[in-house]
Amino acid sequence: MKKLLLSLSMLFGCTVAFAAPVEAVYTADPADNSTVTESPTTITLTFSGVTKVEDGANLETALTATLNNAEYVFGGTRASNNEYYLSIPRNNPITNGTLKVTFGEGALSLDGNPNAPFTYTFTVDPTYVPTPSGPVFTPANGSVVKSLQTISVVVPGVLGQSDADVKATLVNKTTNASYSVSYPDVEGTTISATFGKAEITDPGEYVFTIPAGMYWIGSWGEEEEGNSPEYTATYTIEAPVADAVDFSSVLTQVLPDESMPADEYWEGAVTVMLTVKGEAAINASSAAKATMTLNGAAFGDALSAADSGTKIMVMPDGEETTLGLMFAEVEKPAGGTYTLTIPQGLFTIGGKPLTEYTHSWEIKAGAADINLAWNPTADGTIDLTSPDSKVVSSGSYWQNFYTTNSGLMSPYDDDFVTIEEKAILTNEDGEIIAEFSDDWSTNCLMPTNGQIRWSIQKAGATADIKKNGINTNGTYTLTIPEGFLKTAAGEPVKAQTVTWTVTGGISNEALQEYTCSPEPGEYKVYPEITLTYKDCTKIVLNGKPTAEVTLSNKTIGTFTISTDGVDKVTLTPNSEITTLAPSEFSVYRVIVPAGAYNLTINNIEAANSEVKLENVYKVATPTPDPLTIDPETGSTLASGEDLRYIYYSTEQTVTFDAAKKARLYTVVDGERSAEPIASYNRTAYDANKGEFYMAANEDGSYPELAEGTYQLVFPSGFYRAVIGGASRSSEEQVLTYIISSVAPKEYTFKLTPEAGATLEELEDLFVEVEGAETVKVLLPLQLSNGTDKYDVVGVADGLTVDYMITTQELTDGEWTATVPASGLEIDGTEYLKVISWKFNIKTPDSVAGIFGDDTLFNVYNAAGIIIFSNGNADDLRTLAPGLYIINGKKVIIRK
């Protein structure tokens, strides 16, 4: 490599010439003196015979523009190789009128020389209808091709065929051979012709002709039959070169390869060095030219055999030959993709021509070492209580910040460059608050009086839900990747970061002051959760946010987020969540993402911080059902002999632990004795029922059981059952019996709802004790559907107990209400029997089924915002699935 670089420095000398102003020869997009129907975003001038265009010494005074004779200011300018760009500001597009751009002397530098004065003009007219022009041939008219198979021509305004007797022709002028041409088809504005041979490869000069009068040209209703002119194109098919050698088969090295930073590329020229095996030479008789492109556009000189010894060097070195091709003299090459094309026959190897060869590589442009200047000052403080109106909006949000260096370009006004890496604004926790890219519609970067304005809209903002900025205290860091900003000359600006501190807004602590309900604990099914924020007066959802619950960092369920609009956020499970923790070290986490909703606290609005509840709510490990026992708990027995045999049954398949025993205890003044007075053995009748029989004393007698209270205890783990695919242990089960010669008083219970009833929803839950004098509540009622289980607190009102139903929604299906043994005190004595009954919940299939078909409906969403009022059943059918308040009643609409 060092040897090649030394050879280059000796062989290719670089000179810089100075001359008088030069005439600018250029093409433009939009074209000079053209009319277009809409404003371009960028004007591109491409200069012929020029390698490098730069801002001239007189740019600021010599470049002027007028729109309809009034001064017009561009968003920015940029030069790249032989192209010059003028950016049209997005906030000031050209909607109608004529733009005239004047380049005075020295506005530009063309290969180091000042330009001679010239003007460029185009017009924007939305009503303009272009005059048909053409034709445009494919392959291009006059091109050299390897074969001909199809020729097409685009003719604006062509409507269809006119004269079927007029024939198109294809003639080989070299051999005078003619070829059959199919009648050219018309599709849109394109006429396509094929030939009798599948592919024509015979060498020669070809002429393709569509005679005049074959087609209609014009517009419908105004067309003129047979008015098309003659269309002619010429092509050359070259004879294949015999015994050509594949260039790639003899190539051993090519430099540069793949990529190379511009700072490491050899100075003075854009040059390619190729080393081949054998004795290579330039073919002096070839007219072919080697070419170079940069990002697809022609770059530098096209090199032919005439450049041998000056720009093309052939350097033999033993059994190899190095070929050097210099395409342009430059101080430092511009970044981009360079592509070399060496046509077949320009070089020979061992007297035989080398085939065509193409090679591409990238030059990485170096970054400009520019320290950015900022408003607000970098590392400074932004006080939302003393706002700079340019930086902080009227709503006390940090809205904007500015890069104040002159002559910089952002992705906003650099439309022709795609930004792969975004600039990001993060908080002190590393959370991305805003992203900036060339997609200006989300987070804007735009020129403002020579500065770059960065406008903050938080991550996730949409056109419908615009988040105003930042009003949460903390430290924020902007990270800008290399090349995100550019100099006016197109050089990328180095990567850098800048930090600001926001004060006077709402604190993160205030956004995290909330209480949770229901009470922390274990639930058979994960509960609906309500967060109540302290001092909050308004909550607004941002879109349709969702939360999730994870177990050991794996998502096991999701929640729909709703709000009362004031201080409460409710998380409703989207499905039953019953996943059990695999070990005692597993962690349940409920996660509400930051920015899911906005809170107004102390008259300041801010997005919520992330909510993370760890092990606050867990899924309870299921246990087998209690055994059904005869005599039932709470029974009064005439003698102790009635406790010799206890009969059990179960609907589950259970396995008993032989090492554990059922034991009988005495109870005095509500206290169970420390030691049992008897134990029981078991005899199974079948898999689901059997008996426990009291074990006799050593002498064969049984314990004497006097009148009094006794408890039969089945210890925890007494039996196991398979639930949810796993074996689960039973909980302790306690049964209470009274031995008395006096029969207990019997009571009748009136239950609401009645046993076996079917309800749309459970509104009342009462137990009325008939025949009693006094009633007190000792334990909660248990409400269960076999999966969900709720404890319901009761309040006695005379002889009726009102069990207070909460807002907890009950799913459809059969539910069992159970007042446990000792759950009530009746007439001063604990009632030892269980009161249990079943009823059903069945939600109507439609809202009309709840209120009636002729009802008018007032509908609000979960945030308390009205959807419609006085609607009918048809209006209800338009509602998407979700939670609604309909005529004051909470209703969930499902798919």
Image (cartoon, rainbow, N blue to C red):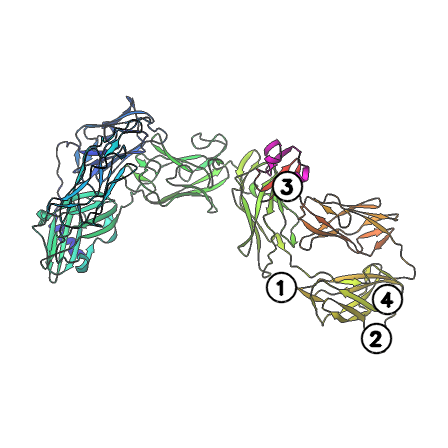
Residue labelled with disc 2: 697
Looking at marks 2 and 3 on the same chain, the residue that comes earlier in the sequence is marked by 2
Image point 11% across, 62% down: which residue?
318
SS for callout 1: strand
- Residues packed near mark 3 inside 10 Å, few (<14), some (14 to 19) or many (20 plus): some
Kindly indicate the quadrant of the structure image that contains residue 656: bottom right
Looking at marks 2 and 1 on the same chain, the residue that comes earlier in the sequence is marked by 2
Q: Which residue lies furthest to the bottom in this view?
A: 699
| Real-space CA distance between mark 2 and mark 1, rounded to the nearest whole angstrom | 39 Å
Q: Can residue 280 be seen in this view?
A: yes
- Residues packed near mark 2 inside 10 Å, few (<14), some (14 to 19) or many (20 plus): few
| Real-space CA distance between mark 2 and mark 3, rounded to the nearest whole angstrom | 67 Å
Quarter of the image containing the C terminus?
top right
Q: Which mark is residue 846?
A: 3
Report the mark closest to the observer, 2 or 3: 3
Quarter of the image containing the N terminus?
bottom left
Looking at marks 1 and 4 on the same chain, the residue that comes earlier in the sequence is marked by 4
Residues under numbered marks 1 and 4 in contact, where contact means CB atoms less than 8 Å apart: no
| Real-space CA distance between mark 1 and mark 4, rounded to the nearest whole angstrom | 37 Å
Q: Position of residue 395 (x, y in %)?
A: 50, 31
Residue type (three-letter) at the residue carrying disc 3: Ser
Left or right, 524 with respect to 58, comes to right
Q: Give the range drawn in magenta.
A: 848-877
Residue labelled with disc 4: 642
Q: Position of residue 72 (x, y in %)?
A: 30, 26
Q: Residue furthest left?
A: 285
Q: Position of residue 39 (x, y in %)?
A: 32, 30
Residues under numbered marks 2 and 1 in contact, where contact means CB atoms less than 8 Å apart: no
Report the mark closest to the observer, 1 or 3: 3
Kindly indicate the quadrant of the structure image that contains residue 722: bottom right
Residue labelled with disc 1: 726
